[in-house]
């Protein structure tokens, strides 16, 4: 459909978009998903939306450094610019081979993302992008270039311009415009410019040298020195404001050999290997750490089992509780915060929602606990990968100087999952068993998503990347710094059979570090974004398969020693661990567990209802070695004194002076449910609560009377504390999700249909008359714009139909004040304040007079 | 993937668990011994601990982090936590960044290989008074008199300095071992060699393993005048006796410097007590250290070294120092001072290993629990807190049990050891045995010891004065009726009384009589822990059982 339009160059972005095929539109919408929510009605609207400042900023922020540099170069080039000019700016006069090779890819990306349009002879940067990237005194460009000669001479008197032209050795012209053009072309001509500069005094050249890489502005006094005077006379420096001069762009470019950037970076910096270990070692180390992670999370939840710490009023965990948890887990506080957040992200803990809110394990925790260890780990790892909460921030302060507490608000960082995935993908790109240096990973990330503005080390993405590396190690995603096979499977990155050579030959100057020339431009194919739920399930299953054999097999025995310790030389079967945990105190944890028997711990086991002979049998059964005599003695000695006094719990009692009647009750089958027990001839204890007991006895034909609560023993031991069913917190993604193929196709079809409708010649519709009461006014975008613009001029109020970001429609009466950049700023009579509406969200506009009647 | 089934489990709390029955256990022990401190050695699993001091000990002995990591990774059953490996490397890396050495022009200097470290420590208020002028960016002069002080301070700051400043030879004096009919045991020889090679340091050997001979061997190496510091006079006499017997030294060459005698000879044996005697705020006997140009200083029972001696030792850093001890465990936790002032550990061997080689007697340890009578229970329950221990430790029933044990081992050499003089007097009376206590004169003590040695008397009741360094070769049974609360090293010393190899290969017996369900039992448990951890399992008996057996 677009073949017939090709010969004529597009005149606007909308036209350029119209000329694109569906695949390329899909690529645009995939790269800039914000454009498709809600689905634009036609390509004009899509183009408008693609040109809005917010969307352009977002798109620019997602460019890699070289592509961004290309965009910056375009911003300082002529409008429109030929590809050759751009190539000159990027590759310099010397035509740097790497840049020459990489540039077509960068331009393709810019085109695909609708930041650049037009064919190679007439490349145009979208206006908003140009405004953002072009140098101005307020926002110096990263290129360090100043304004062009034309811009710098804009306010200059024609006489002065003629003087400069003459001083530069050019013939004077009859008007200022042609003089400026002549001057610009002189500066742009390497040979003539070289000749001009050859005459320059050495001190003047020094001045130029200082300004050449920017900032291009300099201060001069009212009476400049001779070396400055020489430059000013020839327009090599132009005054911008009293006391300030600027080096025109053309001059700087000449001095730079044509380079717009001091250091174009066409090749992504390679991720360097810090160490390479056999993959088995890495996998085993990661599995060991994975096991520790499981043990730690379980320990944390066990610690909170009977009522976790209170929830702060502002949300989150108090510093004191975090400290206590850190001590209980025997880790540092930041690490404790990480584990707590991990359990939270995995949906294992939540607030219980009671009046005195506390954290508690969720019902899901019990379910999780029942799963095989490898599955437990995968669940944690998935939660970590997808989560937007960033434990690394805990302990820091937010913008309002409030401390960020664990589990508290303000910890979501949308970029986190993307950075995590990207870091892991970079790790996956290394040969198996290779650990990267953190610096090279950070450098690579900084290249892929450069910061606009000054570069800093502690920007959020770098910090996220650093946290990712350390958290991955903690969680057992990596082992000794290298990505483990199980984690590779989990993120859906297939293991490289022979280890690819990518990124290894860091010194190779030719070609980008990756094998494919524009690997990074087709990033989605190589660096998988979040997997779809189905893909993730498959990936997780294969991760489970890889991890399971690496986790230590639970043991069914311990070694008992005469110093009253028991050593479990590996993880224990859960029932065994549970009993030992009661019978003895844990002294040391890790691969093995060291338990110590003390009188207190043995008493605890007896309290838990075990008898001395139970314990002897238990130890004999699970000990590989004979039970040492001191231990046997200890158990007997504690048991000897245990239980002399008896304390029990009952919910209700039955008291009666007549033993016979109590006999009768006990003998009655219907009393079974009350679970009565005779404590003394005239007293029965019941496990049923008083109300049930009363009912039961009445049902049996007795006439019991309730006694006052005094003396009544209540069961106080609560069950393990659980929150109501809770779902894990939803990650807060950055912007809308990338639409899948079906949605994209549908969206594109809808846009095209709408486009056809709006661009097809139509009969003038008679509005107003057919408007059903309450229905939204509907006009074409062109009419809407025209009507609103007219309303600005007349100052009239109009009636619009509006669809907000959530998709709900409303009607409002507005008095438009300004229309620009696709937005209407208007006084909203409905809301009684000034608001701004995106034009594309306005369904239509109608004049108000009709309704007011 | 094949799982390497190593004998070692590395715990996250930096303990190492070694399964002793594993086929590679010996190899593993040898590999980790240089850097890990053996903490417990019960029958199946030995526990080692990684400490900064231990790792620096290893560095001082020439091991590097690579070796340590390799050893852990090689023998570990499970993957070693990465964080732990990083921590080891970082800790070990801290040793040796600073070096004390002799500069031809400036005397003692502190040099660094890492300038920021030097900057950091020079900023410390505690270091500033110890150093002199900055010679170059990496070197600073140190007052020679502060050599010990600065080492101590740097260790506290976490940057232990390597002392390469060397030693003075001291005044030469011929000393030879007189190996007629006996020879240094292999481990003693090894200990002497390690010490001499390392310059200064501590040798850890169990009681009864012949630490005195390690001292003698080192003196024969040094061939120089020697100052020996011991705990008390009896111990001093024993050293003298042993040196005359085992070396070429004669009685005239050995002086005793104690409360009663003040002899300064080429080899002088002084007691800690006389050195730390203080009159009018000064230590009058300190000049002993300067009275001769000593070539070697031997510290017996380093773990008891009193604080003032540390202070003097700090000034003696140019002399070779040998520390001898059964345990580096100090109840006061000053292990780091031993490290920085005497020197790193140069040799150690666990008790059980030396016992297995037949050099110390195997021991049968029994704890006998006695019941308080009903009247005593009531009295105990109402006793004042500070009286409680004394009350339960001296219960009447203990006497009966002690008598029963003495009767059981009639004819063997028996020591009864206790804390409370009343109790001991009473026991002495009932057992018809002499009592040695604080007030017994040294002459009387030696006489009693001698007749005990000769077998003229077979039961001896001693108070804690006999805790240290008395040599009673033929005691085969020790009965402990009360102790200094929960002191672990006291228990070790007392067991040491019966661990010397017996002429007839008799098994040694160590009985500890404690009152059930009282503080006594708690203290006993604490004291025994050390020995149980050394692999000496206690049997626990009821007094009734013991008395019934007898009947």
Image (tube, rainbow, N blue to C red):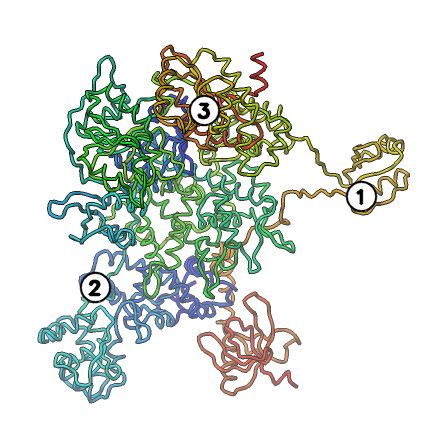
Question: Which quadrant is the C terminus of chain A positioned in?
Answer: bottom right
Q: Which residue does the numbered mark 1 point to in the structure image?
A: A690
Binning the other alpha carbons within 10 Å of mark 2 as few (below 14), some (14 to 19) or many (20 upward) gives many
Question: Is A120 located above or below residue A248 in the figure?
Answer: above
Q: Tag 2, which secondary structure? A: loop
Q: Which label's residue is closer to the chain start, 1 or 2?
A: 2
Question: Which quadrant is the N terminus of chain A positioned in?
Answer: bottom left
Work out whether residue A781 or residue A826 is closer to the camera in this orientation and state it. Answer: A826
Both on one chain, marks 1 and 3? Answer: no
Using the image, name the chain to which the residue with label 1 belongs.
A
Label 3 vs label 2, nearer the camera: 3
Work out whether residue B457 or residue A85 is closer to the camera in this orientation and state it. Answer: B457
Q: Position of residue A628 (x, y in %)?
A: 51, 22
Q: Distance of mark 1 from mark 2, alpha carbons?
A: 93 Å
Q: Say left or right for A67 vs B414.
A: left
For the residues labelled 3 and 2, say whether their Cβ atoms are less than 8 Å apart: no
Work out whether residue B454 or residue B496 is closer to the camera in this orientation and state it. Answer: B454
Q: Distance of mark 1 from mark 3, alpha carbons?
A: 63 Å
In which quarter of the view is residue A216 placed? bottom left
Q: Tag 1, which secondary structure? A: helix
Residue A632 visible from this viewpoint: no
Binning the other alpha carbons within 10 Å of mark 3 as few (below 14), some (14 to 19) or many (20 upward) gives many
In which quarter of the view is residue B227 placed? top left
Q: Tag 3, which secondary structure? A: strand
Q: Position of residue B115 (x, y in %)?
A: 22, 51
Q: Which residue does the numbered mark 3 point to in the structure image?
A: B417
Q: Position of residue B107 (x, y in %)?
A: 14, 46
Q: Which residue does the numbered mark 2 point to in the structure image?
A: A92
The residue that appears at 21% across and 77% down in the rendered structure is A184
Using the image, name the chain to which the residue with label 2 belongs.
A
Work out whether residue B225 or residue B325 is closer to the camera in this orientation and state it. Answer: B225
């Amino acid at each position: 459909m677009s073949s017939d339009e090709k010969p004529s160059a597009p005149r606007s972005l909308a036209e350029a978009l119209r000329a694109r095929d569906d695949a390329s539109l899909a690529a645009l919408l995939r790269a800039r998903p914000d454009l498709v929510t809600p689905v634009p009605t036609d390509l004009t609207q899509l183009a408008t939306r693609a040109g809005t400042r917010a969307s352009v900023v977002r798109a620019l922020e997602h460019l890699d450094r070289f592509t961004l540099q290309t965009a910056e170069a375009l911003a300082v080039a002529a409008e429109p610019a030929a590809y050759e000019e751009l190539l000159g700016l990027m590759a310099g006069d010397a035509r740097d081979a790497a840049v020459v090779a990489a540039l077509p890819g960068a331009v393709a990306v810019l085109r695909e993302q609708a930041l650049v349009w037009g064919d190679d002879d007439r490349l145009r940067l979208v206006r908003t992008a140009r405004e953002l990237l072009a140098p101005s005194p307020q926002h110096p460009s990263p290129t360090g270039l100043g304004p062009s000669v034309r811009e710098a001479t804009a306010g200059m008197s024609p006489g002065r311009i003629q003087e400069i032209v003459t001083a530069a050795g050019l013939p004077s012209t009859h008007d200022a415009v042609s003089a400026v053009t002549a001057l610009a072309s002189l500066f742009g001509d390497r040979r003539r410019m070289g000749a001009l500069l050859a005459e320059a005094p050495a001190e003047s050249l020094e001045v130029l040298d200082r300004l050449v890489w920017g900032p291009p502005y300099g201060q001069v006094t009212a009476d400049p020195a001779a070396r400055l005077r020489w430059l000013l006379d020839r327009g090599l420096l132009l005054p911008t404001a009293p006391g300030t001069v600027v080096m025109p762009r053309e001059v700087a470019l000449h001095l730079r050999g044509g380079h717009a950037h001091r250091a174009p970076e066409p090749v992504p910096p390679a991720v360097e290997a810090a160490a390479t270990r056999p993959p088995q070692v890495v996998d085993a180390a990661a599995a060991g750490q994975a096991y520790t992670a499981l043990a730690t999370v379980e320990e944390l939840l066990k610690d909170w089992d009977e009522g976790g710490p209170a929830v702060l009023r502002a949300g989150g965990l108090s510093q004191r509780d975090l400290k206590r948890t850190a001590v209980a887990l025997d880790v540092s506080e930041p690490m404790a915060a990480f584990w707590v957040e991990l359990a939270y992200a995995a949906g294992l803990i939540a607030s219980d929602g009671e009046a005195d809110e506390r954290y508690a394990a969720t019902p899901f925790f019990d379910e999780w606990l029942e799963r095989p260890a490898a599955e437990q780990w995968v669940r944690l790892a998935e939660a970590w990968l997808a989560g937007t909460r960033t434990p690394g921030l805990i302990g820091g302060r937010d913008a309002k100087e409030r401390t960020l507490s664990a589990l508290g608000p303000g910890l979501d960082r949308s970029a986190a999952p993307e950075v995590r995935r990207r870091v892991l993908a970079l790790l996956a790109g290394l040969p198996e068993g290779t650990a990267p240096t953190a610096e090279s990973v950070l450098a690579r990330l900084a290249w892929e998503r450069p910061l606009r503005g000054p570069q800093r080390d502690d920007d959020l993405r770098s910090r996220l990347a650093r946290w990712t590396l350390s958290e991955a190690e903690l969680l057992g995603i990596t082992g000794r710094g290298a990505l483990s096979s199980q984690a590779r499977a989990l993120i859906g990155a297939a293991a490289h059979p022979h280890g690819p050579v990518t990124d290894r030959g860091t010194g190779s100057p030719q070609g980008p570090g990756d094998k494919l020339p524009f690997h990074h431009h087709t990033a989605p194919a190589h660096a998988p974004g979040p997997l779809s739920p189905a893909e993730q399930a498959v990936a997780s299953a294969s991760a489970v398969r890889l991890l399971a054999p690496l986790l230590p097999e639970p043991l069914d025995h311990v070694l008992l020693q005469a110093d009253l310790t028991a050593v479990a030389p590996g993880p224990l079967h859960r029932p065994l661990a549970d009993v030992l945990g009661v019978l003895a105190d844990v002294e040391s944890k890790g691969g093995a567990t060291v338990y110590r028997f003390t009188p207190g711990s043995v008493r605890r086991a007896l309290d838990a209802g075990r008898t001395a002979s139970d314990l002897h049998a238990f130890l004999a059964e699970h000990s590989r070695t004979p039970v040492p005599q001191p231990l046997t003695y200890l158990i007997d000695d504690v048991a000897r004194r245990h239980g002399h006094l008896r304390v029990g719990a009952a919910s209700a009692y039955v008291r009666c002076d007549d033993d016979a009647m109590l006999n009768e009750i006990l003998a009655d089958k219907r009393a079974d449910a009350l679970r009565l027990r005779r404590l003394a001839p005239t007293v029965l204890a019941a496990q049923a609560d008083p109300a049930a007991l009363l009912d039961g006895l009445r049902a049996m034909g007795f006439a019991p009377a309730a006694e006052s609560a005094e003396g009544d023993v209540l069961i106080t031991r609560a069950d393990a504390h659980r929150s109501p069913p809770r779902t894990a917190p939803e990650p807060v993604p950055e912007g809308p999700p990338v639409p899948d193929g079906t949605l994209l196709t549908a969206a594109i079809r809808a846009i095209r249909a709408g486009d056809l409708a709006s661009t097809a010649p139509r009969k003038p519709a008679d509005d107003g008359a057919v408007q059903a009461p309450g229905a939204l006014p509907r006009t074409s975008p062109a009419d809407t714009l025209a009507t609103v613009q007219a309303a600005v001029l007349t100052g009239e109020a109009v009636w619009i139909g509006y669809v907000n970001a959530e998709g709900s429609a409303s009607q409002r009466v507005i008095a438009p004040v300004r229309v620009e950049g696709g937005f209407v700023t208007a006084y909203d009579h409905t809301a009684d304040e000034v608001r701004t509406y995106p034009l594309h969200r306005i369904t239509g506009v109608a004049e108000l007079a009709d309704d007011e009647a | 993937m094949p799982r390497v089934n190593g004998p070692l489990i590395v715990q996250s709390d930096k303990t190492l668990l070694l399964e002793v029955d594993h086929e590679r256990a010996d190899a593993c022990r040898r590999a980790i011994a240089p850097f890990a401190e053996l903490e417990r050695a019960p029958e199946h699993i030995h526990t080692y601990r990684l400490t900064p001091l231990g790792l620096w000990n290893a560095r001082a002995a020439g091991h590097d982090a690579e070796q340590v990591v390799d050893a852990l990774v090689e023998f570990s059953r499970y993957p070693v936590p990465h964080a732990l490996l990083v921590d080891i490397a970082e800790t070990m890396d801290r040793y040796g960044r600073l070096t004390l050495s002799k500069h031809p022009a400036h005397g003692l200097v502190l040099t660094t290989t890492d300038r920021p470290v030097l900057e950091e420590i020079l900023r410390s208020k505690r270091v500033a008074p110890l150093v002199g002028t900055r010679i170059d960016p990496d070197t600073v002069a140190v007052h020679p008199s502060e050599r010990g002080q600065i080492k101590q301070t740097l260790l506290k700051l976490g940057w232990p300095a390597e002392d390469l400043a060397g030693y003075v030879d001291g005044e030469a004096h011929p000393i030879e071992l007189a190996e007629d009919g006996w020879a240094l045991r292999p481990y003693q020889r090894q200990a002497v060699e390690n010490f001499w090679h390392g310059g200064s340091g501590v040798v850890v050997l169990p009681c009864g393993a012949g630490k005195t001979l390690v001292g003698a061997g080192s003196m024969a190496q040094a061939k120089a005048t020697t100052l020996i510091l011991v705990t008390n006079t009896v111990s001093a006499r024993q050293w003298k006796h042993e040196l005359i017997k085992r070396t070429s030294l004669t009685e005239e060459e050995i002086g005793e410097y104690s409360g009663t005698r003040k002899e300064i000879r080429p080899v002088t044996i002084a007691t800690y007590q006389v050195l730390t005697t203080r009159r009018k705020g000064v230590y009058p006997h300190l000049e002993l250290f300067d009275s001769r140009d000593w070539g070697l200083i031997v510290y017996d029972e380093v773990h008891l070294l009193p604080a003032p001696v540390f202070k003097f030792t700090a000034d003696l850093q140019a002399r070779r120092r040998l520390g001898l001890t059964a345990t580096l465990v100090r109840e006061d936790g000053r292990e780091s001072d031993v490290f920085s002032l005497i020197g790193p550990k140069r040799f150690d061997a666990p008790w059980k290993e030396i016992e297995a080689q037949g050099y110390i007697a195997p021991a049968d340890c029994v704890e006998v629990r006695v019941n308080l009578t009903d009247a005593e229970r009531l009295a105990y329950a109402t006793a004042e807190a500070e009286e409680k221990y004394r009350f339960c430790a001296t219960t009447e029933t203990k006497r009966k049990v002690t008598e029963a044990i003495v009767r059981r081992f009639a004819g063997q050499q028996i020591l009864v050891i206790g804390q409370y003089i009343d109790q001991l007097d009473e026991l002495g009376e009932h057992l018809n045995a002499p009592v040695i206590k604080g007030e017994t004169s040294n002459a009387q003590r030696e006489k009693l010891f001698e007749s005990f040695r000769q077998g003229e008397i077979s039961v001896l009741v001693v108070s804690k004065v006999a805790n240290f360094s008395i040599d009673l070769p033929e005691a085969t049974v020790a009965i402990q009726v009360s102790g200094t609360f929960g002191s672990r090293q006291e228990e070790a010393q007392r067991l040491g009384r019966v661990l010397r190899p017996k002429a007839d290969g008799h098994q040694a017996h160590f009985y500890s009589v404690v009152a059930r369900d009282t503080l006594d039992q708690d203290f006993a448990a604490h004291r025994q822990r050390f020995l149980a951890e050394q692999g000496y399992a206690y049997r626990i008996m009821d007094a009734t059982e013991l008395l019934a057996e007898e009947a």
